[in-house]
Amino acid sequence: MENRVRHYREAAEWSQGELARRLGVSRQTINAVETDKYDPSLPLALRMARLFGLDVRELFIDHWMPEE
Amino acid sequence: MTKQASAAAGWRKMAMQTIVGAIAGAGGMLAVTSLMEWQHGLDWVPSQIILVGIGFVYALMGLFVGLGTMAPHLFGQRMLNVADAEEIVEQRSSMGSSALSCLILGAALMLLAYAVTADAAGAAAPVTPATAYAILLAVLAGFVAASLWMWKNFDELWRQLTVDVSAITGQILMLAGIVWGGAAAAGLTTGPHPLDLVSLAFGSMLLACFVAAGRRGMMAPR
């Protein structure tokens, strides 16, 4: 799933380590999410969005559309 | 440093780690088996050599990670695939436990292979195969306990990785069991030596660790 975590993290001038510390996860988790190698759980995605003051759909972009 | 320069430095570091690991692994393995053959006149068969090799890889990984964990600034950030030394410091307890587990497990596997080889040759060995087996079981119990303790400290990515490793290990084992067992039953090849089963289990887990880590982008240079 496409995401804009790196964009908002860099905008906040946080390192991966700083974001990991604020979320209580490992740096590898942040790195894996930013490189699209891991989709975070729903609770973690919600926490990330809350931390950046965003709606979760602004942070994680799913291009899926329901069939007409 | 630009992103391109940083990426190039990362790949250089990974190439260096691979070369050092390959030299240390191949050289060490050759040295260990040559020493044992020379000292005891043992005749190593492929099943025993493979188990020694797998044990040696575990021990070597444990040694490298252990050294890196003990000295993150001096060795760790150069030898391990981390962004910087602080990353090691943050995960010192889980990395230290993993390193110790790998080191002890590797030694136990090599001891079992050595004890079986010496016993088959009628040579004197520090332990009998039965004792080596009992040691391996005790180490496994410790390995499980350490894994349970680490699970509590894992975040969701690491928990998912653990599940991935278990699933991939199971798939490799099933495939190998079906193909090899079926072929042996059909008389196309010989059945596995008992040590092959041990090698298969730990070798599959080792391979699964690399596959699972690679799929999550953890093998890419940091």
Image: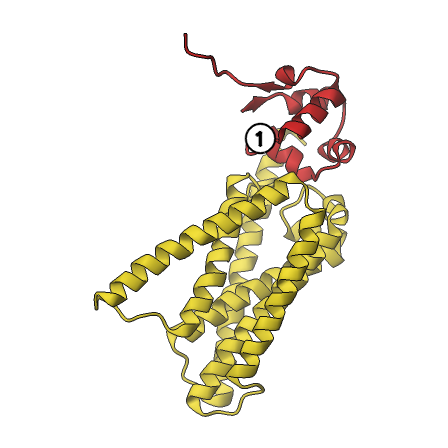
Tell me residue B177's x, y (percent): 36, 60
**Of the pair B96 and A43, the residue shown nearer to us:** A43
Identify the chain drawn in yellow.
B
Q: Residue at x 43, y 89 (%)?
A: B121
Q: Which x, y percent locates residue B74?
A: 74, 54
Neighbours of disc 1 within 10 Å: few (<14), some (14-19), many (20+) = some
Residue sitting farthest toward the left: B187
User: In this rendering, is residue B15 above or below B201?
Assistant: above
Q: Is residue B205 left or right of residue B91?
A: left
Report the quarter where the C terminus of chain B lies: top right
The one of B33 and B190 positioned closer to us in this rendering: B190
Which residue sits at x=45%, y=53%? Answer: B170
Specify whether B153 is left or right of B130.
Answer: right
Vertical order, B204 against A29 (above or below)? below
The colour scheme used here is by chain
Residue at the far top: name it: A68
Q: Residue at x 71, y 43 (%)?
A: B84
Choose between B218 and B156: the one closer to the eye: B156
Residue B37 appears in view? no
Q: Which residue lies under the disc numbered 1?
A: A39
Q: Image height check: is A17 above or below B165?
A: above
Which corner quadrant of the image does residue B133 belong to? Answer: bottom right
Instruction: Say what secondary structure mark 1 lies in.
Output: loop
Residue A44: give x, y in percent of width and height.
68, 30
- Shade representing chain A: red
What's under tag 1, amino acid-wise?
Answer: Asp
Image spot of residue B110 (x, y percent): 53, 74
| Image mark 1: chain | A
B5 displayed left or right of B121: right
Quarter of the N terminus of chain B within the rendering: top right
Residue name at image x 70 percent, y 55 percent:
B149
State left or right for residue B156 relative to residue B30.
right
